Each structure stands twice: as structure tokens, then as C-alpha cells.
Image (spheres, rainbow, N blue to C red):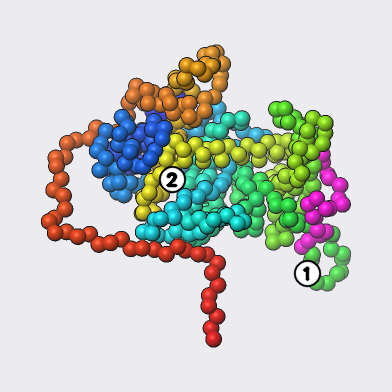
Amino acid sequence: MNTTSVLQQFRQSVYQILPKRADAMVDLVDALTVAGHVDSPVALSEEAPYRRKFSSIYDTLGEGRIEAEQVHPILERQQPADCEQIAGYEVYALDCTPDERPEAETLAERGLLKAQKNAPVRVGQKFSWLVRLVKQRTSWIAPWDVRRVKVDSNDNQTAVAQIKALDGQSKRPKVVVADSLYANQVFLAVFLVLQTVVALVRLRQNVILYEQPKPRLAGKRGAPQKHGAAFRMGKSLRKPDRSETFSLGSQQIRLDAWHKLHLIKLPTLIGLVLRVEFLKPDGSLRYKRPMWLFWIGPETVALQDVCRMYLWRFAIEHAFRFMKQHLGLNAHRLTDNDAIQRWMWLCALAYWQLLLMGRQVEDLCSAWYPRKSQDQQVWMTPGQVQRGAGRFLAKLGTPACAPRPAGKGLGRIKGYRPALKKRHEVVRKGQTTQKRL
């Protein structure tokens, strides 16, 4: 099946699962796909694929419906056939991105966003994204799930729910890579019961792990030990169990691994600790501190494959930047949480369309940029694909029906005065309650 047929099938499948405002929502996804720069949702009414009036934009976001449980099987079936794997694993990246809303007083469940030390306080919401990494040495991803981190939850609990859904979707082996914010017992405990998903997380420099305890002596009373000797990263005298050096492009990387280690609150989750050091041409360290990774998959996987899995994770950061700059991820200015969730899914579906049409779109680069020959199998960037997406969709057509004239609306009843929207306080987690006298 060629790429055009896959894209048509994807668009038709998405159109069929939309229970309300399906035609307008498909037009809105197409408008996001070709816009290039989104100042606000209303501005999308000026794009050619959106065949309706600007007044229907917020009606579509408010009344439309997108059910993630129905979208997941479509995304599973329509993954590009040339998605890469490492060591037989599909590689998924997990991360949260903020949506700053400092002035949205009528938006419920705004919280304080995490900031660096001495940085100004930021207010807004966070969204957890789980994406599949598509092609190494590119920024392409395939979004699989997006969820808002609610005020009664946190990043780790939201991520656990996403990974459970991913585990039940297919039986193919998968690995989820995440940064050091997920290196804790709340997130990692779920991998004790998953069947098809393993984890690879980064460790902070001050994390202490423990070796396996010594076998219990026969006849000794008391509970068996759970922890052996402490393993302090950078300070442990224990020699590495495995070491190797490999080249990634022009970069030399040295790897040292220690087996059979665990976190203090997860003694039954045994993993491998990997130290990653980047070297200069003369063999000295390029950075002062190494990078430490915790791998809970099979120890038979090559160390360089584990390292390449994590380094591939940075594609999700490039994807966030592209979606915010060119798909209007944070340009919605909505005050209804359900409508905001729909907007995030519309941006994800627009990115999917760019991914599926990426090998068929004409490269409309400027005349002063060098053009690639047609014989070269080169992946264009998402921005390059978006430049040619308008022409491509115009030729492809749309499964959505054209709008029908509805006449002039009656407007508000004379004398109607809408009530002011309720103002909400910023939610501050972790506040201590006042002591009783």
C-alpha cells in the first residue's frame, strides 16, 4: 500500500470515529496541517481547507468529541512501515510539556509549573505526551497519546495510565525512554506487571542504588535482607561488569555497566546501571559529569543499543518546539478543559498527517537552498513537509462533507445579559494545612 492510500485510509478512519462536528473537525485538522503559523484558533478560518465561517471554530471545539480509546487503534494500524526499531524494540518517548496560562482566571485547575531555581513563577497546565520515535537522526515522532495532568494527579501517575494503555494495545516489545523526573518508585513500579513494555530512565547524580543481598544462611532467624551494598554513582569502588566504546557519527562514547542493582523502594525491580561518557578526539572527557541510565530490560541487549535508545529521546523535544511554533499547540486560549484536550488531539492528528504525507509531498524550498536529487532517499523535516502540504491536500481531497448554507442566525434575545464566568484560584500543591490550636 503506497503512502497516499495510507493517508486516505487514516483520514477516513478518523472521520468515521468522530461522533459530533465530524466535518468541521476534519477541516480544522487540515487547516492546522497547512497553516505554518497559528495565532489563534479563529485565524484558522482564513486557511483554504477550512470551508466554514470563523464563528464555527469555537463551536467545533466546544461541541466536538474525540475519544482516545477509539483513536489508539487507528494510530496503531497506520504507523509508517519504515518506523525504525533498536534491538527489536519499538522505542517510545515520554515527557510533559507546559501550557502557560498566567492571565486565564476563568480556567479551572491551573497550577504552578515547575521552574528552575530562582526562575520566575509560571502558572498554567501540563500535558503528558507518549510518542513513538520514527526515524533516527531526524525529529519525526508518531504521537500516540496526550493527556492533561490533573490537579489531583501528577506527571508519574498520568504516565502510568498511558503506559498501561500502550501495553494492552499490541504484543510487540516496546521500550519507553524518559528523563530523570520519572526515575522513582511511582513510575517504575508499573513495569513489574507489564508484559510488553520495559523502561529506560535517566538517573540523577545523587541517586543511591543497592546490590542484591547475600544469600540467607540456613537456620538464621528473622526476615531476609532486601538490600545489599550501596552503589553510589561516581563513588562506588565496584568495577564495571561490562565496558565498551563505540562511535556514534563523529562522537566517541564510552560505556560502563553494572548489573543487578535496584532502588531502595523497589527491591524486586532489578536493572542495569549504565554510565555514558562522551569523549574528545584525544580521549579526554567532553563533559565534566557523565550521564547515568537505568535499564530494566534484558541484560543481553548490547550496551550501545541501550545508549542509542536514550539519545534518540531528544526527538520529542524538537517535536514540541515544532508543534508550538507551527501547529499552535499553546495558541488556543480556551477556558474549557475538555475543549483544550480536543485541541491537543487535533494538533496531534495534524502532525500525523504531516508524517504520513512526508514521502509524497513536493519539496517547495526557496530557490537559494540546495535541492536534493530525486534519487536520494532523504527524509524532509516537518517544516519542509508543511510547506507543500497545502497543494498535496488540495489534490487528495477530503472525506468531510461541504458545509450547507444555514442562513443568518437570530442572535441574542434583546435584553439578554450573560453571567460573568467564575474566577478560579491557582492550585498550589503541597500546601501544609494550618495547625489547630
Q: Residue at x 73, y 31 (%)?
A: 251
Decide: is 192 above or below 26: below
Q: Residue at x 70, y 50 (%)?
A: 203
Amino acid type for the residue under numbered disc 1: Ala
Dominant secondary structure, magenta: loop
Q: Which mark is residue 114?
A: none
Q: Residue at x 52, y 14 (%)?
A: 374
Using residue 208 as the reference point, say whether residue 320 is left or right of it.
Answer: left
Amino acid type for the residue under numbered disc 2: Asn
Q: Which residue is mark 2?
A: 330
Check if residue 197 falls in the magenta segment.
no
Decide: is 161 above or below 324: below
> Which part of the image, by quadrant, shows the C terminus?
bottom right
Q: Secondary structure at mark 1?
A: loop
Q: Secondary structure at mark 2?
A: loop
Q: Residue at x 63, y 47 (%)?
A: 179
Q: Quadrant of residue 21?
A: top left
Q: Does residue 237 appear in this view?
A: yes
Q: How many marks?
A: 2
Q: Which mark is residue 223?
A: 1
Mark-to-mark CA distance, 1 and 2: 53 Å
Which callout, 1 or 2, points at the residue further toward the start of the chain? 1
Viewer-closest of 7 and 335: 335
Q: Which residues are magenta?
A: 226-243
